[in-house]
Amino acid sequence: MPDDSGSVRLEVAAAVGRYRLALGSVRFRGRSGARRGRSVGSSMEFLDFRDYVPGDDLRHVDWRSYARSEQLRVRLHQEEVAPHTDVLVDTSASMATTPGKERAARVLALALLHWAQREGAAARLLALGGGRLDAGSLSFVEAGDRPGPPATPLRPNGVRVLLTDGLWPHDPLPLLRQCMAGAARFACVQLLDPWELAPTAEGALTLVDAESGARCEVQLDARAVAAYGQRLQRLVEALRAAVVGEGGTFVQVAAAGLGEMAARALLPAGLLEPA
């Protein structure tokens, strides 16, 4: 892993304040904050009435209603919470096939953590198939083509964001369902290197599988590039369909600087909104 944690933090600090997570009108669970919760709380947003019972705070009694009906009723207000947020990170070696992709993955993971913390949320980085991660020492070295859900239990009724390249040869739906189960808001961020999105015909190449280390001699001509493009499109559409079909948000990101990734992909997809 390149030792650029300082520059990664500076890049995130420079761009993260322009946006916030776009969470919509979903009701969450979490600690006290600014988002709508699932329970009665003390915000200014009216929720409902109920009959007065001894011990209720008299400040919440609707005295106007009492003047009309002589029935004591209490005004209930919407709970406001900071939804707990779990950022699930695919730590497989394919996330670091190029220095640019690896840096973008580290920047996005740290930025997502910061965006959640700016909401006052209890935010965590969790590895697919593993436990909690330290944003300052994030690395992508795991091998294997079948990542599993995090070993750490996921918290219900909160926000979950999956950061992955999605380059799995198997059906993504079972894993996605496990990652999405019980979440109030789920998003999948598929990170790919620009070369992975649009390779150029470069003639004879030796390709090395990032996960297994297997080597393969290929002739990367126009026909091979076209066939690769078709296969990638099928893979991406399968991932997109699995996420959207389960009610989540899907966004594909080309590895770049955080400001560019946010403006070109995360904001238009509705994962972020202006701060």
Image (cartoon, rainbow, N blue to C red):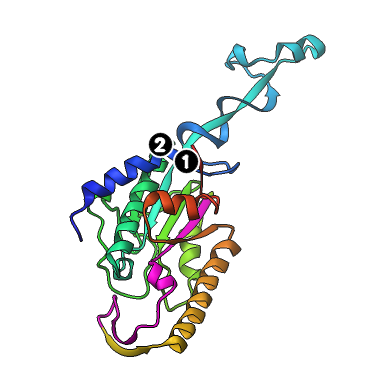
Q: Amino acid at mark 2?
A: Arg
Point out which mark residue 118 bears.
2
Q: Is residue 176 above or below residue 88?
A: below
Q: Please give the range of residues in magenta.
A: 185-213
Give the quadrant of the N terminus: bottom left
Q: Which residue is mark 1?
A: 20
**Mark 1 and mark 2 in contact (Cβ < 8 Å)?**
yes
Q: Nearer the viewer, residue 195 or 29?
A: 195
Q: Is residue 190 magenta?
A: yes
Judge left or right: residue 109 versus residue 81. Answer: left
Q: Quadrant of residue 243?
A: bottom right
Q: Quadrant of residue 55?
A: top right
Residue at image point 53% right, 41% down = 28
Q: Residue furthest left?
A: 3
Q: Nearer the viewer, residue 109 or 52?
A: 109
Rounded to the nearest whole Å, what is the CA distance between mark 2 and mark 1? 8 Å
Q: Is residue 259 magenta?
A: no
Q: Quadrant of residue 161?
A: bottom left
Q: Is residue 247 above or below residue 201?
A: above
Q: Is residue 56 above or below residue 4?
A: above
**Residue 178's spot in the image, x, y percent?**
47, 63
Residue at image point 42% right, 52% down = 260
Q: Secondary structure at mark 1?
A: strand
Judge left or right: residue 214 versus residue 44. Answer: left
Q: Amino acid at mark 1?
A: Arg
Q: Nearer the viewer, residue 148 or 115?
A: 115
Judge left or right: residue 99 versus residue 114. Answer: left
Q: Is residue 238 above or below residue 159?
A: below
Q: Secondary structure at mark 2?
A: helix
**Residue 12's spot in the image, x, y percent?**
33, 45
Dot 1 crowding, Cα within 10 Å, few <14, some 14–19, many 20+:
some
